[in-house]
Image (spheres, rainbow, N blue to C red):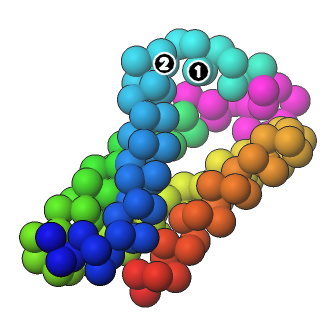
C-alpha cells in the first residue's frame, strides 16, 4: 500500500493512459469498417489517403500495446516498486500521440490536433516523472 501513496500521480497517469489508449484501440478493432470509412474521408486529398487501413492498423496495435503496458506499469509499481513498465507505457503513449498529431496536421484538422495537445501534456508529464 505504501507504493500506492508514493506513486499515486504516476498511477493516475497510467490509468489515464490505460483508459484513453486501450479503449481507443479496442474501438478501432470492433468498428474497423466505420473507422476506416471515416478516416478515408478525413485524409482524402492528402498523401496519406491511400494508406488509411495500414495507418489505422498500426495505431490500433500501438494503442492496445500502450494500454497493456500501462496495466503492467501499475502492477509493477504496486508489487515490485519498479517503474520501468510505466515509463515504457508513457513513452509509447507519447510516440503514438505524436503520430496522431502528424495525421491531424496533414489532414488540416487543426481543432483535432489541438485536442491531442491536452493528452500529450498529461503523457509527457508521465514521461518526465518516470524518467
**Left or right: where 21 falls relative to 2:** right
**Is 11 left, or right, of 38 in this rendering?**
left
Q: Dividing the image into 4 quarters, which one contains the N terminus?
A: bottom left
From the top left corner, tell me how far across and down residue 131 is, in percent: 43, 86
Magenta segment includes 45: yes
Q: Residue furthest left?
A: 79
* Residue that carries the numbered disc 2 in the rendered image: 32
Instruction: Identify the residue at horizontal 58%, vertical 64% (top origin).
Output: 122
Q: Which residues are magenta?
A: 42-53
Q: Residue at x 41, y 81 (%)?
A: 130
Instruction: Classify 8 as above or below 109.
Output: below
Residue drawn 78% across the image and 27% down it:
42
Tag 2 and tag 1, C-beta contact below 8 Å? yes
Q: Nearer the viewer, residue 44 or 114?
A: 114
The residue carrying mark 1 is 35
**Helix, strand or loop status at disc 1:** helix
Relative to 57, residue 117 above or below: below
Amino acid at each position: 500500500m505504501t507504493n500506492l501513496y508514493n506513486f499515486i500521480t504516476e498511477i493516475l497517469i497510467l490509468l489515464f493512459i490505460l483508459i484513453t489508449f486501450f479503449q481507443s484501440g479496442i474501438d478501432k478493432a470492433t468498428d474497423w469498417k466505420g473507422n476506416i470509412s471515416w478516416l478515408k474521408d478525413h485524409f482524402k486529398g492528402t498523401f496519406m489517403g491511400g494508406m488509411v487501413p495500414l495507418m489505422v492498423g498500426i495505431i490500433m496495435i500501438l494503442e492496445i500495446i500502450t494500454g497493456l503496458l500501462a496495466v503492467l506499469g501499475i502492477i509493477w509499481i504496486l508489487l515490485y516498486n519498479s517503474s520501468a513498465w510505466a515509463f515504457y507505457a508513457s513513452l509509447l503513449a507519447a510516440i503514438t500521440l505524436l503520430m496522431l498529431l502528424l495525421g491531424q496536421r496533414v489532414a488540416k484538422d487543426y481543432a483535432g490536433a489541438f485536442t491531442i495537445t491536452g493528452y500529450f501534456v498529461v503523457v509527457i508529464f508521465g514521461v518526465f516523472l518516470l524518467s
